[in-house]
């Protein structure tokens, strides 16, 4: 039986794409750059805010100075508006409650900056007692570097073979591979089943409740 399930946040626990896109478009427009339709953003996210802004900028404007400038405006907007449109995925609150009732430990591993990660997890899942909520922190490599997973394992006191890592992208599947834990790719998020297969997802599921059957295996 698995003792710990680690969840990615954006595209796995919550559908946050509209708020992420709106914040990025705010920063782009404020600095005189063209904006993008919100349906373009699923392919921009997944590697942290720096990479999101880099991908959204015109190719000839992609430098660190511009990224840092737009990041200030992004965070100003996002910190105030990150719950405007964001919602938990259908079935996810019930899944987390069921896992918690079974005694399975739960954690979050996200490339979103730490303050927003903590806020959103506690806002949308206030009744879930996560053993660790990890976002992007200064001095810690972002996913797919496995450091975030190793930190959670140390906090939870669980061995690798007793862990499931659940996410919606190739970044997540690669993170699980590098951490040597079993991976579960979800198809309700921001990326495709094809991408999950390309990055060797251990299992691919279409509904949150399918995780329950994987716990006992």
Image (cartoon, rainbow, N blue to C red):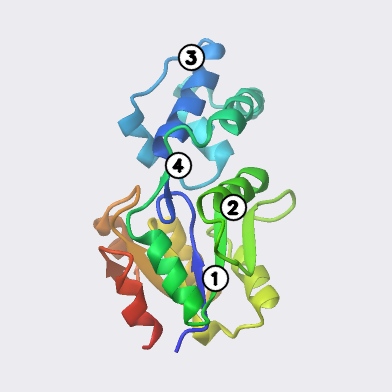
Mark 4 element type: loop
Q: Nearer the viewer, residue 179 or 151?
A: 151
Between marks 3 and 2, how big is the CA–CA gap? 34 Å
Task: State which quadrant residue 167 falls in.
Answer: bottom left
Q: Can you identify the residue that label 3 sits on?
A: 33
Q: Residues within 10 Å of mark 2 (few under 14, many from 20)?
A: some
Q: Nearer the viewer, mark 4 or mark 2?
A: 2
Depth check, mark 1 against mark 3: the one in front is: 1
Circle 3 packing at 10 Å, graded few (<14), some (14-19), many (20+), is some
Q: What residue is disc 4 on?
A: 45
Mark 4 crowd level (few <14, some 14–19, many ≥20, 10 Å Cα): many
Q: Quadrant of residue 194?
A: bottom left
Placement of 178 over or under 190, stated as above or below: below
Quarter the N terminus occupies? bottom left
Comes first in the chain, label 1 or label 3: 3
Up/down of 155 relative to 16, above or below: below
Q: Which residue is mark 2?
A: 122
Nearer the observer: mark 2 or 1; the answer is 2
First in sequence, mark 1 or 4: give its number.
Answer: 4
| Other residues around mark 1 within 10 Å, as few (<14) / some (14–19) / many (≥20) | many
Horizontal side of 144 relative to 71 (left or right) equals left
Q: Nearer the viewer, residue 129 or 29?
A: 129
Q: Quadrant of residue 141?
A: bottom right
**Where is mark 1, residue-wise?**
106
């Amino acid at each position: 039986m698995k003792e710990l399930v680690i969840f990615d946040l954006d595209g796995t626990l919550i559908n946050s794409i509209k708020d992420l896109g709106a914040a990025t478009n705010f920063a782009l427009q404020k600095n005189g750059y063209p904006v993008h339709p919100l349906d373009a953003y699923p392919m921009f996210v997944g590697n942290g805010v720096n990479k999101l802004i880099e991908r959204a900028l015109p190719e000839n404007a992609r430098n660190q100075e511009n990224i840092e400038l737009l990041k200030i405006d992004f965070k100003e907007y996002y910190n105030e508006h990150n719950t405007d449109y964001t919602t938990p995925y259908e079935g996810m609150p019930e899944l987390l409650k069921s896992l918690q009732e079974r005694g399975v430990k739960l954690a979050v591993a996200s490339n979103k900056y730490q303050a927003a990660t903590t806020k959103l997890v506690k806002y949308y899942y206030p009744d879930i007692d996560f053993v660790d909520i990890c976002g992007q922190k200064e001095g810690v490599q972002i996913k797919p570097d496995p450091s975030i997973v190793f930190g959670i394992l140390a906090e939870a006191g669980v061995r690798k073979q007793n862990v499931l890592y659940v996410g919606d992208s190739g970044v997540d599947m690669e993170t699980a591979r590098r951490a040597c834990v079993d991976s579960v790719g979800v198809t309700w998020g921001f990326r495709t089943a094809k991408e999950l297969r390309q990055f060797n997802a251990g299992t691919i599921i279409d509904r949150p409740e399918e995780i329950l059957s994987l716990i006992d295996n």
